[in-house]
């Protein structure tokens, strides 16, 4: 299989790359997060296992080993796992946590009511210390003392016998320690240093002000402000250098952090510096000035799947891509990235198999020719929600309803009686202030809608023009499944049967259900921690898969085949869920993109490029890449004659080129399986790189001519639609081993290591 990644600067997908926690275990495990998903690496950050837990973006995380972790949720509760996130348990004692630390004393955590120490990470003891305010940062000073800063800007030291002393530094923001050295960052002032455990202090006058994050080892210091890049000092603060090379541009506006803080974590770990930021996880070698983004997936997920009458499947991938394929695995893209960050729902018109709707980003996209052309409907809502519902006989019945919110933040729908040409907004009754999570038509042409997180259900008998509050459940509704005379509600507290006469809980009390669909005379639901379960009036029967992944969507084909959208891709089953195969390998538009790092390139307008802009590199321009593959094929174009040097793992080859046609084959090679480094240097002339989009295509592995080294295949191999020169430079990777397409055997039921959801 070929994978194409068009050359692009490393652009983080804010706000979904947030690496706000970072822990380095003694066995080398790296534990961080990707927003509300935990990520663990055992190979210095080259690859990560995504661990879905359901308690939101972690406040702090501590890895004691590859399997033993402690994680605090946004509410300050502490959770523990001994199996890398497969199961979780609450830790008694600590509560309302605001800061955590790990070190020689074990784990010490703190909140507004005090500090707790757990030598083994589980049995925590209250240190009986009364602080002036809740701590925001803690650091362990050897075996005997703990230092910290609090929300009021104070600094303090706690000795092993419980003695509390308030330290000299005020307006404190951050703290880091090494041996007897204590370094504190201060608001509006340079950092202050103590070399005797906090008894005496002096200002590092040459240092930057307002360092919110700090790390110190020996005479080496790293620090970061809210928005500046990382400052580095190699002489204990005598001089400083600003290090921003390789870091992404800061996300601003609606895509940026609400509090303006971009940098959260810094670590100095032997031969590597680490940075956790709003734009992702970075690392660099101490003797290198360039930061490199870690191979951290940005919440890979397929949130929506939909069957076509011909038996093919539509898959919505993270990043906005829509793909179509069948049993022959001839997957192809039918929609370029539309609506950041992902398609939330794909719906095929009941009476027109070529008419599709995609709710993505904040818009409603549609196609009337099976994806050849796309347009958007002007639904009027200030924010389009997660759901669209064409009438049961659409387009013969041209009614269409979209869920969302008004510009004032009220839960609402936009309804159309003419197939989407004109729209009217209708505000939901009651106190609904969230985007509705689902909307469905019933068999009697009525409508039901679930409002956001508060469990409100509303119904309409006039196509969405007016609504009444039908009932309020005690849990957030994740999905609605229309049945005969009833609607089934999959919620965070079990399965409910809802009708005009009321609602009753029928099963799965206390469990979280994430999606559902009618199947085999009952309802097929996804239960967190249990996988897919078939429920009928006779009871529940577990299919047992995928117990270790988060099911975003379930679709049932006319012939009974099943498809599910997971965080690891789209999977399907043709034997009632007994075995499953990976249907579509694309769970995101830039699937495991290996970023090029570009230096000395200039944006240049090109009308037929994907975004109208490419990167032009002249003599001296370089592009560097680290990849995992077994073959390379370099595709690109030049302006007139040019020469480049391609270096793979230290072996260099110079090329003389004159290839004005976009998509020309420049160079190809076989590689040993494994991780490789590639350096592309422009020696003369001009090379054009597309720095806007990333794509991929399928093609068989090529064979190299033994004499010339040229591939045995010819012509362009980009499998995407003809973009009139969009493929300006690409690198193709063969032998990608992250995905598998075979039916699952018993050993494959946990197909993504340690990815079980955690506590709600």
Image: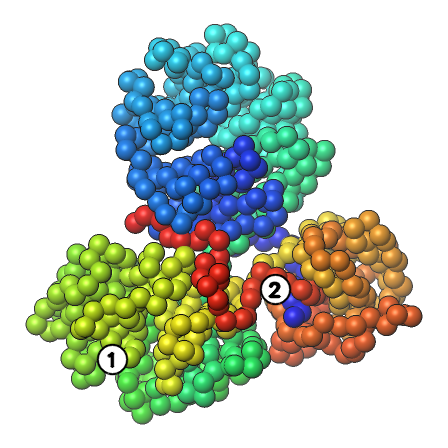
Farthest residue in the front direction?
Answer: 746
Name which residue lies at 55% across and 45% down: 41
The alpha-carbon separation of the residues under discs 1 and 2 comes to: 45 Å
Image side of residue 705 versus residue 261, left or right = right
Residue extending furthest toward the left: 501
Q: For the N terminus, which image quadrant? A: bottom right
Q: Residues within 10 Å of mark 2 (few under 14, many from 20)?
A: many
- Residue at 75 percent across and 66 percent down: it is 633
Please state the horizontal and vertical placement of residue 23, each as a whole percent of the image: 50, 36
Q: Which residue is mark 1?
A: 521
Q: Indicate which disc residue 410 carries.
A: none
Residue 752, compared with residue 556, is above or below; it is above
Q: Quadrant of residue 27?
A: top right
Q: In this rendering, does residue 615 appear at all?
A: no
State the image coordinates of residue 747 (x, y, percent, origin top left): 48, 61
Provide the secondary structure element on which disc 1 rests.
Answer: loop
Q: Earlier in the sequence, mark 1 or mark 2?
A: 1
Percent of width and height locating residue 192 = 52, 17
- Drawn side of residue 472 relative to residue 526, left or right: left
* Foreground pick, 340 / 55: 55
Query: 384 or 308: which is nearer to us?
Result: 308
Which residue occupies the extreme bottom position in the image? Answer: 396
Question: From this viewpoint, which residue is outermost toward the right?
Answer: 707
| Residue found at x 48% / y 68% | 744
724 relative to 23 in the view: left or right = right
Viewer-proximal residue among 559 and 637: 559
Mark 2 lies on residue: 693
Tell me: residue 724, above or below residue 559: above
On the image, the x and y values in percent for residue 220 come to 63, 24
| Residue at point 72%, 72% (across, down) | 701
- Within-10-Å neighbours for mark 1: few <14, some 14–19, many 20+: few
- Any part of residue 534 in sight: yes
């Amino acid at each position: 299989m070929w994978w194409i990644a068009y050359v692009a600067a490393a652009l983080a997908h804010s706000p979904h790359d947030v690496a706000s926690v970072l822990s380095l275990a003694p066995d080398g495990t790296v534990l961080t997060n990707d927003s509300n998903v935990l990520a663990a690496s055992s190979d210095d950050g080259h690859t990560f296992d995504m661990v879905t837990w359901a308690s939101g973006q972690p406040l702090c995380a501590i890895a004691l080993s590859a399997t033993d972790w402690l994680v605090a949720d946004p509410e300050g509760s502490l959770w523990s796992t001994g199996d890398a996130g497969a199961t979780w348990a609450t830790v008694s004692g600590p509560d309302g946590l605001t800061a955590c630390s790990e070190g020689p004393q074990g784990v010490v955590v703190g909140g507004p009511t005090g500090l707790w120490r757990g030598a083994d990470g589980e049995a925590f003891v209250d240190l009986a210390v009364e602080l002036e305010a809740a701590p925001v940062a803690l650091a362990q000073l050897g075996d005997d003392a703990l230092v910290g800063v609090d929300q009021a800007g104070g600094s303090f030291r706690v000795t092993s016998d419980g003695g509390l002393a308030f330290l000299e530094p005020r307006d404190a923001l951050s703290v880091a320690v090494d041996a007897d050295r204590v370094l504190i960052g201060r608001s509006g002032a340079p950092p202050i240093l103590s070399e005797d455990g906090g008894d005496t202090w002096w200002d590092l006058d040459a240092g930057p002000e307002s360092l919110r994050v700090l790390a110190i080892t020996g005479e080496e210091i790293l620090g970061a402000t809210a928005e500046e890049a990382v400052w580095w000092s190699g002489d204990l603060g005598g001089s400083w250098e600003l290090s921003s090379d390789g870091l992404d541009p800061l996300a601003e506006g609606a895509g940026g952090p609400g509090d303006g803080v971009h940098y959260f974590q810094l670590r100095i770990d032997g031969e590597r510096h680490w940075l956790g930021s709003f734009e992702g996880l970075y690392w660099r070698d101490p003797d290198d000035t360039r930061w490199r983004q870690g191979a951290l997936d940005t919440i890979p997920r397929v949130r929506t799947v939909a069957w076509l009458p011909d038996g093919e499947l539509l898959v919505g991938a993270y990043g906005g891509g829509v793909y179509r394929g069948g049993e022959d695995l001839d997957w192809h893209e039918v929609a370029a990235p539309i609506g950041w960050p992902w398609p939330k729902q794909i719906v095929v018109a009941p009476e027109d198999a070529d008419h599709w709707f995609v709710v993505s980003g904040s818009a409603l996209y549609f196609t009337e020719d099976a994806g050849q052309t796309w347009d958007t409907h002007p639904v009027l809502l200030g924010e389009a929600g997660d759901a669209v519902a064409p009438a049961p006989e659409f387009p013969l019945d041209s009614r269409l309803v979209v869920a969302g919110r008004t510009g004032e933040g009220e839960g609402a729908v936009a309804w159309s009686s003419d197939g989407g040409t004109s729209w009217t907004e209708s505000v939901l009754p009651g106190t609904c202030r969230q985007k509705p999570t689902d909307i469905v038509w019933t068999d009697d042409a009525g409508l039901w809608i679930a409002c956001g997180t508060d469990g409100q259900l509303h119904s309409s008998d006039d196509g969405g023009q007016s609504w009444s509050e039908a009932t309020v459940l005690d849990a957030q509704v994740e999905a609605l499944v229309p049945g005969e005379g009833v609607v089934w509600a999959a919620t965070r507290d079990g399965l409910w049967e809802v009708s005009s006469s009321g609602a009753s809980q029928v099963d799965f009390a206390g469990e979280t259900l994430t999606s559902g669909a009618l199947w085999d005379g009952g309802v097929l639901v996804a239960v967190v921690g249990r996988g897919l379960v078939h429920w009928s009036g006779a009871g529940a029967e577990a299919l047992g898969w995928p117990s270790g992944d988060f099911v975003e969507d379930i679709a049932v084909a006319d012939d009974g085949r099943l498809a599910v959208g997971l965080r690891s891709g789209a999977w399907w089953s043709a034997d009632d869920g007994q075995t499953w195969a990976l249907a579509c390998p694309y769970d995101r538009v830039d699937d495991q993109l290996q970023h090029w790092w570009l230096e000395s390139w200039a944006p240049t307008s090109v009308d037929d490029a994907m975004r109208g802009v490419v990167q032009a590199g002249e003599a001296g321009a370089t592009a560097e890449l680290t990849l995992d593959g077994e073959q390379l094929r370099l595709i690109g174009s030049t302006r007139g004659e040019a020469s480049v040097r391609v270096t793979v793992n230290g072996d260099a080859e110079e090329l003389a080129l004159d290839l004005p046609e976009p998509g020309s084959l420049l160079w190809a090679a076989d590689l040993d399986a494994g991780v490789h480094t590639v350096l592309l240097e422009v020696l003369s002339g001009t090379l054009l790189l597309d720095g806007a989009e990333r794509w991929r295509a399928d093609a068989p592995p090529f064979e190299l001519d033994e004499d010339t080294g040229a591939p045995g295949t010819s012509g362009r191999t980009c499998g995407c639609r003809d973009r009139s020169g969009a493929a300006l430079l690409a690198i193709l990777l063969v032998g990608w081993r992250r995905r598998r397409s075979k039916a699952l055997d018993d050993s494959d039921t946990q197909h993504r290591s340690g990815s079980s959801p955690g506590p709600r």
